Amino acid sequence: MEVIPAIDLRGGQVVRLYQGDFRQETVYSTDPAAVALAWQQAGAPRIHVVDLDGARAGRFVNLGAIEAIAAKVTVPLQVGGGVRDLDMVSRLVRAGVQRVVLGTAAVRNPSLVRFACQALGQEAVVIGLDVKDGKVAVQGWMQAVERDVYELAKDMAALGVLRFIYTDISADGTLKGPNVQAVADLIRATGAHIIASGGVGSLDDLERLAETGVEGAIVGSALYRGAIDLGEAVRRFGAQGSI
């Protein structure tokens, strides 16, 4: 299982939100590239980057910071937040990003998902399944839609998607533990490669996720608050990253 550190960008800074609430923000660094380099040096197999401003705006806001990260590190990057058209996908790939995460577009513009898989290859496209109170959330987690997460995953798989990031928004940033049952259910229902996100607060949480068969676990607040040492987590659970 890959243990993947998260870098969330807002206003060019590294931040963490509590349960996706933009009003509950903690700033951890003004130098995202330096943070990425530190995670790489600690053994990160890849780094997960989200443009929070972009997710709300529907366009890149922190592209400069993403490009600076890509120029600084050699580990693979997976990046999402505000990616709404194929040109935006291509710009990230040109910047050196290995995986592009589509969330809102998967719900609002599924044809983009198909085109992206065809143009860039299935390994380069990841769908973000962001769930709050049982409903899929879009537009930077600000809007819920009447869409079943299993149905959405199966529809995306039919378009060529191989990999999903499942985020339990209510758990995100809380360090109270991931929704292990929901992750396990999704793996059983889809048979797809699943990366879990949201709520990881300890090595025991990572152990429980590893037992479900997830491909990876994204860790954010627990790293920034010192609850988990990335080097130790990678040594215990980690596989080396691949594109």
Image: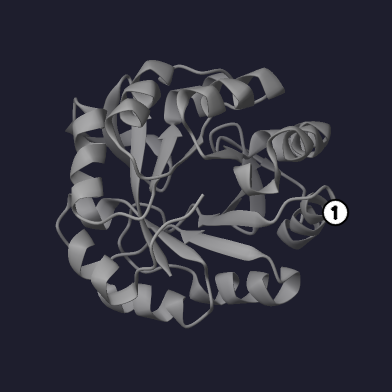
Any part of residue 193 in sight: yes
Mark 1 nearby-residue class (10 Å; few <14, some 14–19, many ≥20): few
Q: Nearer the viewer, residue 178 or 153?
A: 153
The colour mode here is: one colour
Q: Position of residue 58 (x, y in %)?
A: 59, 21
Q: Position of residue 54 (x, y in %)?
A: 50, 23
Q: Answer with the quarter of the image where residue 107 lies.
A: top right
Does 208 appear above or below 193?
below
Q: Position of residue 53 (x, y in %)?
A: 44, 23
> Horizontally, is 20 left or right of 18 in the view?
right
Does 85 appear above or below 186?
above
Query: What residue sits 63% from the left and 40% below the top?
Result: 103
The residue labelled by disc 1 is: 158
Does 25 appear above or below 238?
above
Does 237 appear above or below 139?
below
View extreme (left): residue: 226
Any part of residue 228 in sight: no
- Label 1 amino acid? Ala
Q: Position of residue 212 (x, y in %)?
A: 52, 79
